[in-house]
Image: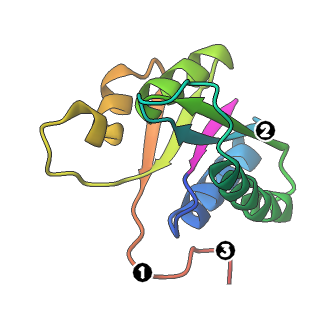
Amino acid sequence: MILAIITGSTSDEYVATTASRLAKQTKLPINLLYVIEVDRNYPIDMEIPEDTEKGEKALFQIEKITSKFKVKSKGEILQARFSGSAIISQSENIQAKLIVLAHKKQKSNNLYDNICEYVTDNAKCDVIMCANLGKQALGNK
């Protein structure tokens, strides 16, 4: 299983294209994961309709990309306090062979700002980071 992290940003196209190409080569299915971070002031299972709607829209758009590659994929939305730990937990739950996510450089010493660093430090599988350089994703013209 390949775990592809979807955030609703312009980098999602790169993540989906990379994951889809790798899924096609390895014949592994893709788990598309959208994480809603819930502030500590609220219960973790509190419904946040606007965030859920944003996640559903993002997953719907990305599922269009993965279907072009004719690979198996399923989307999932999780709520968590911190995206990094949710990503690691999900990767272990589905026994992911690979995590694909957008690279986001942070200049912060706060653990919760450094999702990429947290994932690479704690993943029990390979991690690929995609950088959005402001160009259209290859293969999606």
Q: Quadrant of residue 3?
A: top right
**Chain-order first, disc 2 or disc 3:** 2
Q: Quadrant of residue 65?
A: bottom right
Q: Secondary structure at mark 3?
A: loop
How far separated are the C-alphas under marks 2 and 3?
A: 18 Å
Secondary structure, magenta segment, majority class: strand
The magenta segment is 1-6
**In which quadrant of the rendered image does the C terminus lie?**
bottom right
Q: Which mark is residue 27?
A: 2
How far separated are the C-alphas under marks 2 and 1?
A: 29 Å
How far separated are the C-alphas under marks 1 and 3?
A: 15 Å
Q: Nearer the viewer, mark 2 or mark 1?
A: 1
Q: Which residue is mark 1?
A: 134
**Chain-order first, disc 2 or disc 1:** 2
Front residue of 28 and 9: 9
**Residue beneath the point at 59% across and 74% down:** 138
- Decide: is 83 above or below 89: below
**Residue beneath the point at 65% across and 15% down:** 93
Q: Position of residue 92 (x, y in %)?
A: 58, 16
